[in-house]
Image (cartoon, helix red, strand yellow):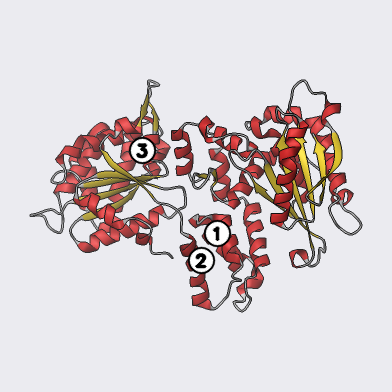
Amino acid sequence: MIDPLVRIDIEDIESLIADKRYFVLHAPRQTGKTTCLLALMQRLNEQTTYRTLYVNIEAAQAARGNVEAGVAAVCSAMTNAAKFYLQDTALAQWLYHGDGATAPATDRFASLLAHWSQHDPQQPEQPRPTVLLLDEVDALVGDTLISLLRQIRSGYAQRPGAFPQTIILCGVRDVRDYRMHTEHHEIITGGSAFNIKAKSLRLGSLTAEETQALWQQHTQECGQTFDPAIWPELWADTEGQPWLVNALGYECTWEDKAARDRSTSITLERYKAARERLIYSRTTHLDALSDKLREPRVNRVIAAMLSGEATTEHFPQDDLQYIEDLGLIRRKPELTIANRIYREVLPREITSPIQDVLHYPQPWYLTPQHKLDMPKLLAAFQQFFREHSDAWIEGFSFKEAGPQLLMQAFLQRIVNGGGRINREYGLGRKRTDLFIEWPIDEAQGYFGPVQRIVLELKLWKKGGLDAVLADGLPQTVDYARRCGADEAHLIVFDRRPDSPWDDRIWQREASEQGWALGVWGA
């Protein structure tokens, strides 16, 4: 456990509360937001200056646009939280058997907040100011969310005597990104419905130091050691995303049954095997990423990043900020997918329907020495691409990245379970890099000899093939050297509509900086 109050700017938050501000704390899913809020509630209640209550209102999502049912669910969640955290049963008594029972839905939550703020069971003569931590606000939709925000706004002027001194709205998104559709098909934004927001705070990921410290707590507790070579890999894989950091630790130290013996050191290869298991498991966290890809403004940006051809000028800054808030990308020092595991998961999720229908028996592309026969494999891909690319790419919602995704789907299906594919791509890179690792000795796996192959994917450009090769060959060699590859290939996708297939499909050898490279057209 990393101290949750270290992860938020507690001084800033306490200053906002003292100044009677209403503000937003948002963070991507499974970042530790709820843990931080509960720790904040405990801290404030221990100081006795305020009565602080954490309320999760996600259950109200089921009401959709039904204001009556939605507000009832929100009020019920608050009274239940008051009983659990504050041992306050009077709030439920007022809601169900007092004036709250007859309050209309459009005013019931505001009335509940007013009653809570004016009645302190411990200090009835001089009630302490109240602070409300309202979690999962952006789970609500439509008229229910509009009603909630407007009821909060309606009592704002009566704080702190007859309304909470501070309300913190918590969720995945900033309130400005709320898009609420009324029953009359009117679209209202969160910024207009909640224009009393003083500030937006974002809970980020763990730092590199915190990521390592969290794992080292395991060593301190039970003596099991980690190879220091793991630390840079762990950071590249997770970039400190808390759920990933914890899930990888669990895979390494528990799902690997041999590692349950705490005298077994966690080596780099054990770590990499745990990483692959986590990716293949398609857990709820990773599976939820694909759901976000269906949103049009997320889809447009991710498609451009997968193709590597776009630059940031193509996209509204609000869209980029929204996708960053979801935790899918990071914008500094350059715009890229948030971490290496997400870079692996997103293409796999997008291309899984293709992988499901590809059936290639493994032996046909292996040499007698159990190496990948890359010329044979790439020639098979050329034929596959010729026969199926138009139909598959037309069905993609990620058409801009279609060729690159088809190549990755083809390779993933073949390499799946026997080797690893590492991917590099991003806006403005104008290429996609694939790095294949294939264990030659099945018994030894990655602990034995490993075949390492680099594939550079590029699109045909205006200057023709010579221009593509002028850029692509040095880039392929540079990437191969960085990866320590034994073999390298450059694949050029020709998507010109007037180009006949016989002109697109070709293969040649090239020499660059002492490297012999395979160059393929598709």
How packed is label 2: few (under 14 Cα within 10 Å), some, or many (20 or more)?
Answer: some
Residue visible at 21% across and 34% down in the picture: 154
Which of the numbered marks, if any, corresponds to residue 40?
A: none
Residue 263 visible somewhere in the drawing: yes
Check if mark 3's residue and mark 2's residue have beta carbons within 8 Å. no
Which amino acid, by three-letter code, is at mark 2? Gln
Numbered disc 3: secondary structure: helix
Which amino acid, by three-letter code, is at mark 1? Trp
How packed is label 1: few (under 14 Cα within 10 Å), some, or many (20 or more)?
Answer: many
Label 3 and label 2: CA atoms lie apart by 33 Å
Nearer the observer, 427 or 355: 427
Q: Position of residue 159 (x, y in %)?
A: 16, 43
Label 1 and label 2: CA atoms lie apart by 8 Å
Quarter that holds the C terminus:
top right
Which of the numbered marks, if any, corresponds to residue 235?
A: 1
Q: Which residue is mark 2?
A: 212
Residue visible at 48% across and 66% down in the picture: 214
Residue visible at 90% across and 54% down in the picture: 367
Check if mark 1's residue and mark 2's residue have beta carbons within 8 Å. yes
For marks 3 and 2, the one nearer the N-term is 3
Eyeballing the image, is 418 above or below 354? Answer: below
Eyeballing the image, is 215 above or below 492? Answer: below
For marks 1 and 2, the one nearer the N-term is 2
